[in-house]
């Protein structure tokens, strides 16, 4: 609150008047006795361009934390799993040297670096979401130049071209799946998703649309030849709100339904899941960050509508294999200030907003949402809080990581919940969250507990008065007389390592004591001590204030004849 007052004091009177008048009082009602279906962990997926970061000390530490979200198993998706090179990472680059050729042109298969990546997944209890790509140098139709040199040179080099020989490519994929089965077990590999390539509708694929369909058919055939029950899909195309991307997705789905299979000559192609991407946008307006949740949701809406238009495909699982506030994870906020949301609680509130909107769109279109991937990981060797789209920096968790901790604390059954401050789906798709903030709610229950997630999201990173939230919970078990409430909070003063780092003077070489303080500040924090509240007529009430861009998770626990769930002291 002190920080808020300092911000207000520095503002012109016209802005101050507008901000003070924007204070909201919001009524939230949760009906625990009105179930609305299951709450699947659709959010439990991360991804990154740089595969060799996976087994770095920082990468492994991050995956170990994600692995503790059990039973909500996290998945990890990464690019460059078949790219040629010695495994040295760089921004938007990585390699495994899985396929080379000897002096006589004979294939040489090496799984050493691939195994380091997948062994790390197994050790940290992460499920691979396997992206089949990119093109090994020896197979590329345009091998030189090969290594990407972004941001000071070209990114889309020889790895982005079609293979010289589709049968050799198919054999590589077949051997990869067989090797995975031998190393990790048939039952495990049958649970992995095998996605063919990444964004083949733009420069990630320097081939035609027909050549991608040929690549897909040979890849899918190879996967199924190695393991008939394996799950294969695609096309991982860009946001379908773009007409070109929408056409690419439709053409691909039509090919899978009734096109001629390039590998088998038969009609249609194997398709166990459908994937596409969705991205928002960020910009500076008056020197302040302005996000755009509408753009992100538009991509999702169009993708769902396209899938739903195919009667034979609408029940297939959908994976939005990248869904993010902006298009470039490696475009650091230090160089691109429009991305400075990444270190702040605004990223956490955006993720809560995105979860709610994605679930609402899936329900509206009656599609089978399997999950969406947050393209954020960690960037070892780069400055503290440099502003990459990441969950952590130097082992210090950012506020956005705590949003996922909150999601992981929610139960399996979603219940009816309303907020007088929540924008409708139509409003978000029309005007985003700009004319007023979206103060939304999701609630769940399970056993002797319930969780209420409330967020105060605004596209604009502006100071504002906190909202007053009045929560009424009904439908508690009739024998419950009191409930233990614990509130967890993400805002500028809680679960926010970035604010603490700035208060230290933004050190790039923090002392061990400072590092420990930053790690502690980065963990999910309680707003206050747990408190027992009285229940009357199966109802209870509580009130609190929630800052702009703040996220709150209220855990309710009670005694009953089935026993008592002890409070969570994370």
Image (spheres, rainbow, N blue to C red):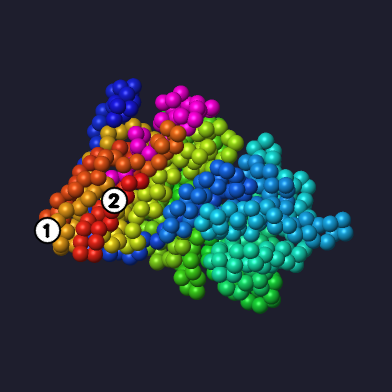
Residue under the point 50% across and 50% down? 64
The part of the image, by quadrant, that contains residue 26 is top left
| Residue marked by disc 2 | 567
- Span highlighted in magenta in the image: 487-515
Q: Quadrant of the N terminus?
A: top left
The magenta stretch spans residue 208: no
Residue under the point 55% across and 55% down? 123
Against 242, is 545 above or below?
above
The magenta stretch spans residue 504: yes
Against 361, is 62 above or below?
above
| Residue marked by disc 1 | 537
* Image position, residue 101 (x, y; %): 81, 57
Closest to the observer: 457 or 300?
Answer: 457
Q: Residues within 10 Å of mark 1 (few under 14, many from 20)?
A: few
| Local SS, label 2 | loop
The part of the image, by quadrant, that contains residue 502 is top left
């Amino acid at each position: 609150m002190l920080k808020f007052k300092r911000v207000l004091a520095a503002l012109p009177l016209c802005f101050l008047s507008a901000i003070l008048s924007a204070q909201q009082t919001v009524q939230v009602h949760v009906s625990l006795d009105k179930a609305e279906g299951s709450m699947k962990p659709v959010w439990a997926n991360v991804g990154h361009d740089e595969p060799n970061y996976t087994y770095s000390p920082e990468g492994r530490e991050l995956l170990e934390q994600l692995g503790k979200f059990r039973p909500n198993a996290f998945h990890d998706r990464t690019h460059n799993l078949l790219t040629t090179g010695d495994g040295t990472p760089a921004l938007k680059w990585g390699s495994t040297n899985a396929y080379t050729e000897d002096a006589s042109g004979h294939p040489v298969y090496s799984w050493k670096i691939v195994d380091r990546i997948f062994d790390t997944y197994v050790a940290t209890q992460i499920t691979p979401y396997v992206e089949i790509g990119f093109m090994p140098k020896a197979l590329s139709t345009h091998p030189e130049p090969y290594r990407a040199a972004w941001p000071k040179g070209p990114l889309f080099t020889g790895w982005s071209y079609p293979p010289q020989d589709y049968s050799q490519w198919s054999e590589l994929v077949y051997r990869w799946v067989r090797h995975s089965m031998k190393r990790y077990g048939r039952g495990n590999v049958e649970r992995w998703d095998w996605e063919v390539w990444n964004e083949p509708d733009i420069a990630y694929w320097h081939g035609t649309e027909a050549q991608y369909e040929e690549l897909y058919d040979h890849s899918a055939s190879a996967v199924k030849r190695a393991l008939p029950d394996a799950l294969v899909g695609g096309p991982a195309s860009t946001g379908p709100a773009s007409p070109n991307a929408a056409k690419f997705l439709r053409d691909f789905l039509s090919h899978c339904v009734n096109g001629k299979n390039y590998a088998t000559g038969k009609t249609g192609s194997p398709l166990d899941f459908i994937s596409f991407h969705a991205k928002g946008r960020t910009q500076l307006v008056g020197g302040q960050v302005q996000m755009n949740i509408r753009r992100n949701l538009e991509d999702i809406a169009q993708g769902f509508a396209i899938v739903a238009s195919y009667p034979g495909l609408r029940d297939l699982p959908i994976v939005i294999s990248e869904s993010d506030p902006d298009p470039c994870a490696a475009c650091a906020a230090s160089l691109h200030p429009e991305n400075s949301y990444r270190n702040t609680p605004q990223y956490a509130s955006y993720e809560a907003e995105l979860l709610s909107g994605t679930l609402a769109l899936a329900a509206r279109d009656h599609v089978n949402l399997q999950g969406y991937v947050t393209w954020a990981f960690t960037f070892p060797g780069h400055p503290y809080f440099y502003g990459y789209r990441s969950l952590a920096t130097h082992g210090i968790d950012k506020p956005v990581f705590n949003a996922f901790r909150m999601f992981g604390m929610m139960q399996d059954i979603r219940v009816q919940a309303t907020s007088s401050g929540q924008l409708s789906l139509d409003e978000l798709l029309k005007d985003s969250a700009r004319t007023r903030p979206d103060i939304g709610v999701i609630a769940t229950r399970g056993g002797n507990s319930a969780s209420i997630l409330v967020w105060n999201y605004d596209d604009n990173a502006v100071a504002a008065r906190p909202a007053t939230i009045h929560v009424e919970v009904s439908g508690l078990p009739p024998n419950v007389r009191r409930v233990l409430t614990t509130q967890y909070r993400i805002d500028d003063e809680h679960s926010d390592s970035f604010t603490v780092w700035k208060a230290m003077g933004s050190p790039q070489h923090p002392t061990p004591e400072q590092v420990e303080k930053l790690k502690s500040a980065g963990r999910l924090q309680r707003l206050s001590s747990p408190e027992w509240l009285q229940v009357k007529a199966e109802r209870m009430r509580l009130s609190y204030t929630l800052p702009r861009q703040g996220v709150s998770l209220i855990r309710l626990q009670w005694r009953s004849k089935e026993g008592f769930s002890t409070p969570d002291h994370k």
